[in-house]
Image (cartoon, rainbow, N blue to C red):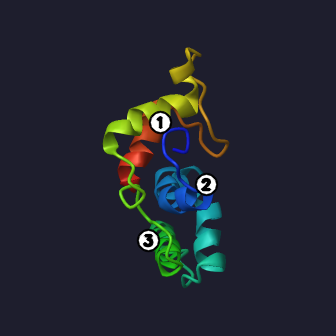
Amino acid sequence: MSAIYDVAHGAGLAAITPSWMRYVYAENIPLFLQFAVNVMGVPEGFRDPESAIEEGISRLQAFYKRLGLPTTLTELGIREDDFETMAEKATGLAYGSPEMPIGSLKKLYRKDIVNIYELAK
């Protein structure tokens, strides 16, 4: 994002993190369930972990909003037209390199990153 837009790092993270979490949580449900219960105070959701995880992510997003942080890419003035370019820069494709996925929990390719941006708009 900041390769194209003048966005503070924390503001960009606030806008993108909940969407990233929604996109990757299935890779490690126990980790995201712990986050929901232990960090965001969701009542134990071991019978329905996915609902508890969604509630935890929603609470995180609400927390960011209470702090006055942006919670969408639109609030940051980021245009949907730039999603592909931003994803190509993130994976190296914009620089003539072969696509290099990013991330450690789940390898994210250009298309994954665009999907996360779509969720975050």
Q: Is residue 70 left or right of residue 97?
A: left
Nearest the viewer among 7 and 88 is 7
Q: Which residue is mark 1?
A: 86
**Mark 2–mark 3 contact, CB under 8 Å?**
no
Question: Residues under labels 2 and 3: Cα distance?
Answer: 15 Å
Q: Amino acid at mark 3?
A: Ser
Q: Which residue is mark 2?
A: 28
Q: Which residue is mark 3?
A: 51
Question: Residues under labels 1 and 3: Cα distance?
Answer: 31 Å
Q: Nearer the viewer, mark 1 or mark 2?
A: 1
At mark 1, the secondary structure is helix
Q: Which residue is located at x 50 percent, y 70 percent?
A: 69
At mark 3, the secondary structure is helix
Give the image quarter of residue 36.
bottom right
**Mark 1–mark 2 contact, CB under 8 Å?**
no
Q: Amino acid at mark 1?
A: Met
Q: Amino acid at mark 2?
A: Asn
